[in-house]
Structure formats: structure tokens, C-alpha cells
Image: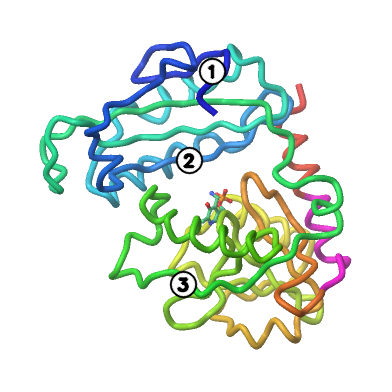
């Protein structure tokens, strides 16, 4: 990914894509002192940029450091990155990490660096998987308790769990993994939140061991607009047997139907279709000139 033309915004200035490097003794690399965001661009404009940069700041606070650019500065830097990269339908990756002033596990005395990269990326899944649904495999890896890890932060270190789960799922021929939490409740996928449709109503796990996604919150409000009942609660994996529809939500995944979890299979039903359409309309409306 590093061998490309273009520019990346790094600590307040644009550098050539290939030169956007950090020192090998960075705290962010050794101890996971880093947080990041994923923002989607539709028609050249970012969707909910303020929410994403506020979350970047909140994630850093959870890890005990401060991002040295405010939300307005980050938003302006992102707009300029998107403009210079000429992105129409794409993805933006802001990232902040502790630097290399010292190599103690303590974060004290480390500077904080920030980068923003953007590239053209219309969809995360290809045609058939995107429209007919992806296949999930239940992972042996679980989301940790909130007193074990900063579970609400979009912290780089927590993505080890996602990489382990995702690699095992893909090696077994699935598209993604479904993670339970430390109690054995349904949690989320490796980069998206989970929704079940049971008897026409939405059921989604309480976000107490994972990110309360911006897309998740958007879909909850679209469901309210459409008069779809919503139940946010702890959900056991056995309830997958009585769900009629299943989908995931995320900045990159958008509203992504799921067609299988292990041996269970699902159809793309009317609730998923309605919410997917509402989400598409909303994201396009926001970017209308
Ligand atoms: N969970 C994880 C682990 C994620 O990486 C993401 C993507 N940021 C989400 C959930 C969904 O969050 P959002 O809707 O804010 O993209």
C-alpha cells in the first residue's frame, strides 16, 4: 500500500505518499499507542466527518493522549487530502500515534503524530457478496471486558483480535468473523456492528464491549424514521436460529446483508432492503450539490 503516487497529510503538511514514514522505535508500533478512524467519501464529500474526528479525539483520550489538531483542523486537512487525491467514492484513514522520544511502555513524554490518507475505494465487498450477503464464521476470539481493554476506543491495539478472527474465518472460506463477547453474548464482526431482524423488529447487541459505530447510530435513527421497532439488548448466539434477516453496519461495510453464519442461512429480507436503501439515499443526499 505504500508504493503509490499521491500525497498524505502528515503532522500538518503534505508529503509524497511513499515518504509518509515513521521511526521504528515509535511507541505506537511497539505498544499499540495509536488510534484511527475510517471515513467514507461519497461524490467527493465526507459523510459525518465531525463525528469521526470527535471519535478520534475520544479514542485518544481513552488511551491517555491528546491529538494535537482540533476537529476543525482535521476536517480541513481531510478535505484538502480528498481534493488533492481527487477522490470521488473513496475512503479516508486518519491515524494518530505516540512517537519515539523514549521506549518505555509508559506513554509519558511521547509526542503525538497524526496522518490522513485517502484513496478511491467504492466498496469493501464485490458484487455478489455485497448484494446477496456475506458469510460469517463464529470466532473463538472474543471481545474483552471493559475493565480489560479500552473497548469503546477505536484503538489500533484492539485490532489484533479482529486480525486473528478475520484470518481464521478467511482461511476457512468465509468472508468475515462473528465475535462473541467475554460473556458469550453476540458482539460484532471485525469491522462492523451486528443487527438481527426477528419478527420484523431490529435487535442489536448493547455496545458495552465494542464500538458504538457511527453507521450503527445512523441506522438506528433511520429505523425510527421508518417506524421499525428497535431492541438494543444482550443477545445470546442461540437467537441466531430465530432471526429472519441479519446484517452488518459500518463506514466501509455500509448496510451489508449476511447470508450465512456457520451452517445457518438467511435471505436478504424487506427490513434489510429498506434500511440499506435509506442509508444509500441519506449518504447520497448529504453529498448532493
Ligand atoms: N466495529 C469495528 C471493530 C469497526 O472497526 C468498525 C468500523 N469503524 C465498526 C464497528 C463500525 O463503526 P462505524 O460505523 O463508525 O464505521
Going from N to C along the chain, the mark reached first, 2 or 3, is: 2
Query: Element at badge 1?
Result: helix
10 Å crowding of disc 3: few (<14), some (14-19), many (20+): many
Residue highlighted by disc 2? 37
Query: Element at badge 3?
Result: strand
Going from N to C along the chain, the mark reached first, 2 or 1, is: 2
The x and y percentages for residue 213 are 54, 54
- Judged by its main secondary structure, the magenta piece is helix
Mark 2 Cβ inside 8 Å of ligand 1: yes
Tell me, what colour scheme is on the image? rainbow
| Dot 2 and dot 1 residues touching (CB under 8 Å) | no
42 left or right of 168 in image: right
Q: Residue at x 49, y 17 (%)?
A: 17
Of the numbered discs in the image, which one, if any, rests on residue 142?
3
10 Å crowding of disc 2: few (<14), some (14-19), many (20+): some
Q: Residue at x 60, y 68 (%)?
A: 178
Q: What range is drawn magenta here?
A: 266-278
Of the numbered discs in the image, which one, if any, rests on residue 81?
1
Amino acid at each position: 500500500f505504500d508504493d503509490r503516487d499521491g500525497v498524505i497529510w502528515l503532522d500538518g503538511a503534505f508529503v509524497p505518499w511513499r515518504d509518509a514514514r515513521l521511526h521504528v522505535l515509535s511507541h505506537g508500533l511497539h505498544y499499540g499507542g495509536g488510534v484511527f478512524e475510517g471515513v467514507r467519501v461519497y461524490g467527493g464529500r465526507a459523510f459525518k466527518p465531525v463525528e469521526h474526528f470527535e471519535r478520534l479525539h475520544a479514542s485518544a483520550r481513552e488511551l491517555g493522549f491528546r491529538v494535537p489538531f482540533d476537529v476543525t483542523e482535521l476536517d480541513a486537512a481531510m478535505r484538502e487530502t480528498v481534493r488533492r487525491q481527487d477522490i470521488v467514492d473513496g475512503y479516508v484513514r486518519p491515524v494518530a500515534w505516540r512517537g519515539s522520544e523514549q521506549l518505555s511502555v509508559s506513554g509519558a513524554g511521547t509526542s503525538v503524530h497524526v496522518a490522513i490518507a485517502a484513496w478511491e475505494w467504492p466498496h469493501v465487498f464485490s458484487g455478489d457478496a455485497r448484494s446477496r450477503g456475506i458469510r460469517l464464521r463464529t470466532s473463538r476470539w472474543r471481545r474483552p471486558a471493559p475493565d480489560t481493554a479500552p473497548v469503546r476506543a477505536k484503538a489500533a491495539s484492539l485490532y489484533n483480535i479482529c486480525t486473528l478472527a478475520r484470518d481464521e474465518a478467511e482461511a476457512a472460506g468465509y468472508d468475515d468473523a462473528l465475535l462473541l463477547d467475554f460473556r458469550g453474548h453476540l458482539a460484532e464482526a471485525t469491522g462492523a456492528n451486528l443487527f438481527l431482524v426477528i419478527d420484523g423488529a431490529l435487535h442489536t447487541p448493547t455496545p458495552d464491549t465494542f464500538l458504538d459505530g457511527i453507521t450503527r447510530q445512523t441506522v438506528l435513527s433511520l429505523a425510527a424514521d421508518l417506524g421499525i421497532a428497535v431492541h438494543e439488548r444482550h443477545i445470546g448466539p442461540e437467537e441466531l436460529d430465530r432471526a429472519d434477516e441479519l446484517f452488518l453496519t459500518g463506514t466501509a461495510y455500509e448496510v451489508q446483508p449476511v447470508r450465512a453464519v456457520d451452517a445457518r442461512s438467511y435471505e436478504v429480507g424487506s427490513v434489510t432492503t429498506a434500511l440499506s436503501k435509506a442509508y444509500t439515499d441519506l449518504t447520497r443526499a448529504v453529498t448532493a450539490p
